[in-house]
Amino acid sequence: MPKQGHFAKSSQIKQLNNFKVKKRGGETVIANNQLTDFLVVRYALTLKKRVKPAYRETIQRMLIEICEQLLTANGNLQQIVPPLLTRLNARVPWQFYLQVLAEWEALQRFLQKELPAVPLRQRLRITASISQPALEELVLQLLVKKVVAITFINQPQADQQRKSQMVAMLTTSLFTNQQIDWKKVRALLQPFPFEIDQSLDEGTRQWLQKLSEQ
């Protein structure tokens, strides 16, 4: 199991994709620690085929991150997703959020449909969902935080008032017609190269590099 916000290693993802459910005594039941494996297989057989090819690995990794917390959070996505994205903010490029938002409704529907069908001894379901507008607002806040952090990276003594003013300005500027203006996000963040955590495994580093170049 990967640490929260650290992503599963690429070798683990390959193992998940090869996961198979075994029947015992005529009854199909899986252990709790196989929940992620089962849902990743279902994703590969269903939703993955409908996701844009360039977005597939991002959505699978997001699914894995969510699945690792479904049991402890009792299927509450409102409890899982906001802290998860906040933890990931410094570890992923802005393109990660673009892809997650683009496929969020499909991913959430997948979980709402597939989770109750997972043959756990005690069945689980999504108990609280996150609307597209709510997720968009959260992502906007995280993107603004990214821009502000980069802007003042060499100004550690910058006063809080200046930062707050910039937050207010960016929040208004980057959100038009009830959605994030990704062209403006790109214009603000693309000039700054994304720094990849070199402690991550090679497959994850390659994914992040490719993602940051889109």
Image: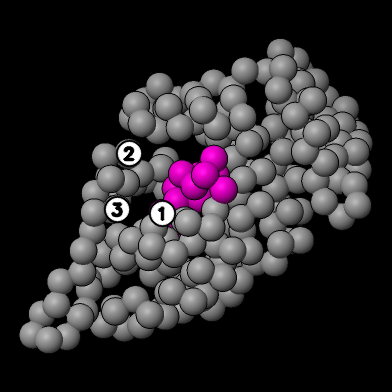
Q: Nearer the viewer, residue 189 or 203?
A: 203
At horizontal 24% and vertical 54% (from top left) the residue drawn is 18
Instruction: Answer whether residue 65 is magenta in the image.
Output: yes
Residue of label 3: 17
Circle 1: element type: helix
Residue of label 1: 64
Answer whether labels 2 and 1 touch (C-beta < 8 Å): no
The x, y position of residue 111, in whole percent, is 49, 69
Q: State how the image is colored.
A: one colour
Against 70, residue 119 (above or below) is below
User: Mark 1 packing: few (<14 Cα in 10 Å), some, or many (20+)?
Assistant: many
Instruction: Kindly tell me whether residue 87 is visible in this rendering.
Output: no
Could you tell whether 45 is left or right of 47 in the image? left
User: Mark 3 packing: few (<14 Cα in 10 Å), some, or many (20+)?
Assistant: some
The x, y position of residue 53, in whole percent, is 52, 44
At horizontal 31% and vertical 83% (from top left) the residue drawn is 122
Circle 2: element type: helix
- Cα distance, mark 1 to mark 3? 11 Å
Residue kind at label 3, given as amino acid type: Asn
User: Mark 2 packing: few (<14 Cα in 10 Å), some, or many (20+)?
Assistant: some
Circle 3: element type: helix
Residue lying at the far bottom of the rendered structure: 26
The x, y position of residue 156, in whole percent, is 72, 18
Q: Give the range drawn in magenta.
A: 52-68
Instruction: Kindly tell me whether residue 132 is visible in this rendering.
Output: yes
Residue of label 2: 10
Q: Earlier in the sequence, mark 1 or mark 3?
A: 3
